[in-house]
Image: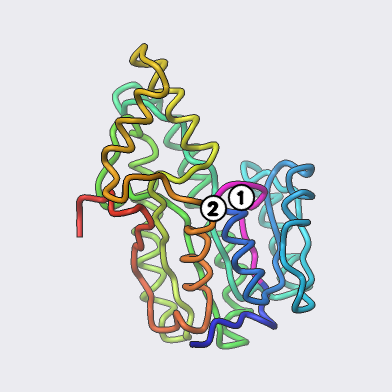
Amino acid sequence: MNLSLTGNHALICGSSQGLGLASAQEIALLGADCTLVARNEETLKTALASLDTSKGQQHRYFSIDFSNLSAVKEWIQSLVQEKPVHILVNNSGGPAGGPITGAQPEAFLNAFQQHVIVNQLLVQAVIPGMKSKKYGRIIQIISTSVKAPIKNLGVSNTIRAAVANWAKTLAGELAPYGITVNNVLPGSMTTDRLFSLFKAQAAARQVGEKEIEAEWLKEIPMGRFGDPREFGAAVAFLASPAGSYITGINLPVDGGRSPSL
């Protein structure tokens, strides 16, 4: 099985911590040069130091605020001119939790810009380099909510579904060029995002966080929360040559929690 990514350049968004960092770590282990992107420079420095360099990989980071579209567009155009991107991992923090009936219109607009428009800008910039090398992988880290909506995540359920449909459309258009487009759907992984959801739901229901955690745990057939590196391994496989005939899918990494096929 060919898992080597040596000679490829991977751009991983939201990669200073959590699932983005875990994905970058696994992609680096396969030999790719990784560019990390997030807002916090200090956490990016720490993240960069955790990447494997045993195959001569050259990694770097950029501190970018994805809410500034003009800055994002200028930055990505400059990056691909300097070094084409062959693997793009789109990842951004999820919208705040809460019932959809209480969500303000601005919450949907802001989330759509952060999760769909930014993805579009990045993809349009990296496609020429992928076509030139005849190798391309575009991977979105989204949510199992695209298969079954999750309670109290009204805005997130809506926007994640938009990303999934955008990606499926893109997969069909890029398949003739050997560029794959897939979504990886994390279940309950031990990240700051998960624990923030526990805290928010506990406060809303006026119960303890441990009670919320126990409820979520009961829904997972494997009986445990996932390790981010387990998720990153799935992303790295799809980024590798071994994943060359897989495109347009939503892959849950959730311990069997999703009720749908």
Marked residue nearer the N-terminal end (2 or 1) = 1
Residue 58 at x, y = what percent? 79, 71
Describe residue 181's horizontal placement relative to residue 10 as left or right: left
Residue farthest front in this picture:
223
Q: What crowding class fits label 1: few (fewer than 14 Cα within 10 Å), some (14-19), or many (20 or more)? A: many
Q: Which residue appears at 64% of the width and 62% of the height?
A: 25
Q: In this view, does 130 lie above or below 39?
A: below
Look at the image and name its color scheme: rainbow
Describe residue 37's horizontal placement relative to residue 136 as left or right: right
Magenta region includes residue 14 = yes
Residue on which the image places disc 2: 91
Q: Which residue appears at 61% of the width and 50% of the height?
A: 14
Q: In this view, does 223 lie above or below 171?
A: above
The answer to which of 132 and 7 lies nearer the viewer is 7
Q: Compute the Cα span from label 2 to label 1.
A: 5 Å
Q: Which residue appears at 39% of the width and 72% of the height?
A: 171
Q: In this view, does 144 lie above or below 31?
A: above
Q: Which element carries disc 2, helix, strand or loop? A: loop
Q: Which quarter of the picture shows residue 90? A: bottom right
In the image, what residue type sits under mark 2? Asn
In the image, what residue type sits under mark 1? Gly
Q: Which residue appears at 47% of the width and 73% of the height?
A: 238
The answer to which of 1 and 19 lies nearer the viewer is 1
Q: Which quarter of the picture shows residue 154? A: top left
Residue on which the image places disc 1: 14
**Are circles 2 and 1 on residues that touch, CB within 8 Å?**
yes
Magenta residues span 10-19
Residue 150 at x, y = what percent? 30, 38
For the C terminus, give its image quadrant: bottom left
